[in-house]
Structure formats: C-alpha cells, structure tokens
C-alpha cells in the first residue's frame, strides 16, 4: 500500500495563490518518492487551478474537503461528488473535526457522505479523533470505535481497500502545535486497525490509516515510521510548498 501524504488547505488561498504554491510544490518534490502518493486538498474555488499544476507531475492527486451526498437538486451552497470528479478530484474528506465541531455534522451524516462518495467513484478519507476531555476521561477507544462504526456503516464489503482511508486526528492536536506522542499514536492506530479488521476482515489490514495533528517537517519522519501509520494529513505545515515538500520526502 502507498503512503498517502495529504495537504489540507482548509479555507486558505485564492486560486492564484493556490496555483503558485502547487506549481512550486510539483517543482520541489520532483519525483514523488517510491511507495508514496501526494494529495492536495484545496478550497473548491482553487480546484481547477491546482489540477492544472498537478498535470505537470506524476503521483500527485487532487481532493475535495467536502460535498453533499446527493446527485443534484435544490441544495443551495452545496456541491456534488460528480462535480468534484469533473474538477479532477479523486479523493474527498469526511468527518474532519472542524466539520464535526464547527459545522455540527454528526456521525450519521458523515456515514452517508462516506458511502455516497465511494458509490460515486471518490476515494474517501474518514477523519476520526477524540476531544481532549474524552482523552482525559479514558474514552479514546470508545469514541474511535463509535466514529468508525457509524462512519463506515454504509460501506459495502466489496469496496477495494485502497478506496477507504481513515485519518486519526486527535482534536487537541489539530492546529495547536501539540503533536500526539509516539505511544499515543501507536496505540490509537493499532486500535483503529483492530476495528477495521472487525468491520472488513482481512481487508482491514490493507486500509490506510493516516495520522493528522500538527505534523511538521521536524516530526514527520518519526511519525511516518510508526506502526500502522500509512500517511499523514497536514494542515498548517502544508500551506507552504517548501515545508510540505519536506514532509512528502521525509
Ligand atoms: P494541522 O491540521 O496540521 O494544522 O494540525 C491537520 C488537519 O486539520 O487535518
């Protein structure tokens, strides 16, 4: 399985700014390291601009931060998976902590998105992770199991393993500079793996599990070497080509 090195640009960058950074990234990365894929997830308005830059590199993929799980219709302000495929996206996120906690999306809605995105030909990255108070209360496993079971409940058993990705992102580590320690990451990823095997049998071993939360060039090589870490999902440190290219090559 290829390690998935993903840049989540959140609500940053105009199309012009995104194109500039993507062009520089393709140049700095050069050849994507063997056994890795690079994924850039810009805001919707920058998708075409970034797609143009990615055309010049191989091993680069484009993703979407969100969509609405319907084909089309009267859903003002929303965007469909078919529109995202048309804009060159092959991946999409669901369940990111900002959508759970700022936009109030619940597990049932997130599960609908995962199932519908897969059905529409997108590879889906389901983000899961506990709040600080849940960690302090010893509820990490309970929270992860519940988010995984509900988030993946509509996924058919015959979906290829490479089409599903889980990103473990402890909420207290996102954008805070406070990265989870190696023991915390190894423990959480082993637990996610065990739930994936419960849900999908042998195929659960082939599903990629990314770590996300304050990944930086300085800590990436240590994190990516840990057991059951099959990639990283990077916010802040992915906004500049220089630092994200270092992460891609870490
Ligand atoms: P961060 O964000 O790298 O800025 O902590 C990660 C994410 O939200 O995916």
Image (cartoon, grey):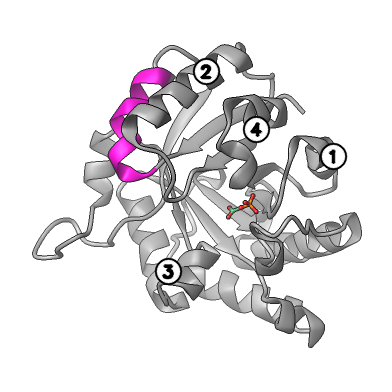
Disc 4 within 8 angstroms of ligand 1 (CB):
no
Q: Which mark is residue 2?
A: 4
Q: Element at badge 3?
A: helix
Q: Which residue is mark 1?
A: 225
| Disc 2 to disc 4, C-alpha distance | 23 Å
| Disc 2 to disc 1, C-alpha distance | 26 Å
Q: Which residue is mark 2?
A: 24
* Side of 118 relative to 180 (left or right): left
Pointer 4 and pointer 1: residues touching (CB < 8 Å)? no
User: Of callouts 3 and 2, which one flags the residue occurring earlier in the amino acid sequence?
Assistant: 2
Q: Is residue 44 magenta?
A: yes
Q: Which residue is mark 3?
A: 110
Q: Position of residue 149 (x, y in %)?
A: 56, 73
Label 2 crowd (10 A; few <14 / some 14-19 / many >=20): some
The residue shown at (46%, 30%) is: 61
Can residue 88 be seen from the camera position used here? no
Nearer to us of marks 3 and 2 is 2
Nearer to us of marks 2 and 4 is 2
User: Of callouts 1 and 3, which one flags the residue occurring earlier in the amino acid sequence?
Assistant: 3
* Side of 215 relative to 76 (left or right): right
Q: Is residue 159 magenta?
A: no
Snapshot quadrant of residue 240? top right
Stretch in magenta? 43-53
Position of residue 231 relative to residue 74, above or below, is: above
User: Of callouts 4 and 1, which one flags the residue occurring earlier in the amino acid sequence?
Assistant: 4
Nearer to us of marks 2 and 1 is 2
């Amino acid at each position: 399985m290829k390690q998935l090195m993903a840049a989540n640009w959140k609500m940053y960058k105009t199309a012009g700014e995104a194109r500039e950074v993507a062009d520089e990234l393709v140049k700095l990365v050069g050849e994507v390291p063997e056994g890795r894929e690079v994924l850039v997830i810009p805001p919707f308005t920058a998708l075409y601009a970034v797609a143009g830059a990615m055309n010049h590199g191989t091993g680069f993929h484009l993703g979407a931060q969100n969509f609405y799980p319907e084909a089309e219709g009267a859903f003002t302000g929303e965007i469909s998976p078919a529109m995202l495929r048309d804009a060159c996206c092959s991946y999409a996120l669901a369940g990111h902590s900002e959508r759970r906690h700022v936009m109030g999306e619940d597990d049932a809605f997130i599960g609908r998105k995962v199932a519908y995105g897969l059905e529409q030909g997108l590879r889906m990255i389901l983000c899961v992770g506990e709040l600080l108070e849940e960690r302090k209360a010893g509820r990490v496993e309970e929270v992860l199991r519940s988010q995984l079971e509900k988030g993946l409940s509509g996924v058919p058993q015959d979906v290829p393993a490479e089409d599903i990705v889980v990103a473990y992102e402890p909420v207290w580590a996102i954008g805070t500079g406070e990265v989870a320690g190696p023991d915390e990451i190894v423990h959480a990823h082993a637990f996610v793996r065990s739930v994936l095997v419960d849900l999908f049998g042998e195929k659960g071993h082939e599903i990629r599990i990314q770590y996300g939360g304050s990944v930086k060039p300085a800590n990436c090589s240590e994190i990516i070497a840990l057991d059951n870490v099959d990639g990283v999902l990077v916010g802040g440190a992915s906004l500049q080509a220089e630092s994200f290219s270092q992460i891609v090559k870490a």
